[in-house]
Image: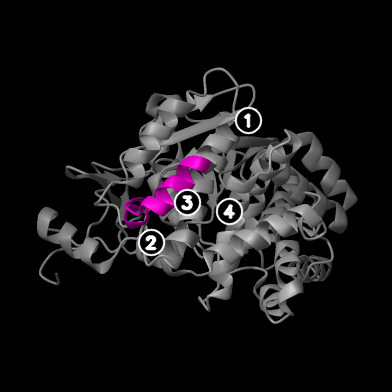
Amino acid sequence: MNEFPLLTRDPIAQPAAPTRIVHIGLGAFHRSHQAWYTAHASDAKQWGIAAFTGRRPDAAEQLSAQGCVYTLVTRAATGDSYEVIDSIVSAHDGADTARLSELLAADTTAIVTLTITENAYHLGADSHLAVNSEPVRADLAALAAGEAPATALGRLVYGLAARRASGAGPLAVVSCDNLADNGTLAGNAVTELAAAWDAELARWVRENVRFVGTSIDRITPRATDGDVAGLAATREYLDPAAVVAEPFASWVLCGEFPAGRPRWEDAGAVFVDEIEPFENRKLWLLNGAHSLLAYLGQLRGATTVAEALDDAVCRDAMEAFWDAAERHLTTPGLDIPGYRAALRVRFGNPRIAHFLKQIAMDGSTKLLMRAVPVLQAERTAGRSGEEAALVIAAWIAYCASGAELQDRATDAIAAALARDEADRVPALLSTISPALGEDAEVVRLVRDLVSSLA
């Protein structure tokens, strides 16, 4: 590949748009989704994105080396198509809080978008900021000392303080993470962290920041060295920052943009008055099925979503879970049969290697949004909830299988697994939600399902 030139921005053909959007959580999904939608807006030349990484600077360094342009490889079952995306105009290490604050303080900045993962909001079971959690306490100590905080949430609050000081005015914060009612939860997290530091800042946030809720959807597997090599051979340039995604993309938004926004609707984004039904459709049908396939599929020897879908046991469990979820998705316009049919095609795309191990991360957080609401709705309706309980049981069996776990509650999960057999299931359920671990009927149901999987 060394004989090919590195992809770089052409300053004449691809002039950088002025920075009006700040993104926190630069990764493959942002590049396949929000950056793609912005590039396809009819007013894209007015809306440049300054993107900041989350945990590591690597993506920013990689993108900066090539002028922040990159290739989106759209991978259909019939073949690949290629597009160079140029909507990101600068990329920064997330730890560069000085630059983040400078951009947020600018009156030209109108929007902050977030893909920081569910855990990064540091919410408790009550959907409010976990003020006593270690990361939040560390952020508050840093803020009190006049130092930059370490978390993405803390850095955002730090930057909003700079905006308040500059008098730059209102803006919108758009959460693009897989949280039900993510706009409200982002608002809770930001406002409550601000209040714990500075009551006047919290008042300013409430008056000037609008938190937009979204439902986001585009399967974006991690690009491999083989993808980069294949792209170089096909396009005759080197692009280490290339992103692979499926053809399908969806973005549903609900909320106000007091300083304006791109015409994302030109790329197919939908603006609605009520976001919850669309969030639930995606969280339960797509994400919930992903979690089920991730745990049950790996227990049965599959490594990708497509492989798990080829397993009749996994496929039947998924369809049964969808049946249960569909009973509670009744809002007109959701077209659940059509959505399910599209998911079968998307999951079965043999050229998208969406690895189950990647999906399996952070199960204790994800299942609270992907499976627990369906379980609760089914039980409220007088049914057992077995189809949704199986998702949780598969996670427990996966945890007990000795698999390497990446989860915010790894220590608690390990402690639960070390308990006597009678106490293990309720302890593991409590890492998802204390109420689950205290519900004797749910414990009994999940324990029986775990035994059946074993």
Name the spot of residue 344 as percent of width and height, x first.
36, 40
Task: Find numbered disc 2 in the image and state the secondary structure of the residue it sits on.
Answer: loop
**Image vertical order of residue 251 relative to residue 385, above or below:** above
Res. 19 visible in picture: no
Residue in front for this viewpoint, 63 or 316: 316
What residue is pinned by disc 2?
355
Residue 295 is left or right of residue 186, and the answer is left
**Image vertical order of residue 272 relative to residue 423, above or below:** above
Tell me which label, 4 or 1, sits earlier in the chain: 1
Tell me which label, 2 or 1, sits earlier in the chain: 1
Comparing marks 4 and 1, which lies closer to the viewer? 4
The mark found on residue 328 in the picture is 1
Three-letter code for the amino acid on which mark 2 is drawn: Phe
Name the spot of residue 334 as percent of width and height, x first.
52, 24
Are discs 2 and 1 less than 8 Å apart at CB?
A: no
Q: Which residues are magenta?
A: 306-320
Are discs 2 and 3 less than 8 Å apart at CB?
A: no
Comparing marks 4 and 3, which lies closer to the viewer? 4
Tell me which label, 4 or 3, sits earlier in the chain: 3
Q: Badge 3: few (under 14), some or many (20 or more) residues near its Cα, within 10 Å?
A: many
What residue is pinned by disc 4?
390
Residue in front for this viewpoint, 154 or 312: 312
Spatial CA distance of label 4 from label 1 is 18 Å
Comparing marks 1 and 3, which lies closer to the viewer? 1
Res. 324 visible in picture: yes
Task: Find numbered disc 1 in the image and state the secondary structure of the residue it sits on.
Answer: loop
Spatial CA distance of label 4 from label 3 is 13 Å
Question: Residue at left 63%, top 51%?
Answer: 389
Name the spot of residue 33 as percent of width and height, x first.
42, 43
Residue 402 is left or right of residue 160, and the answer is left
Spatial CA distance of label 1 from label 3 is 19 Å
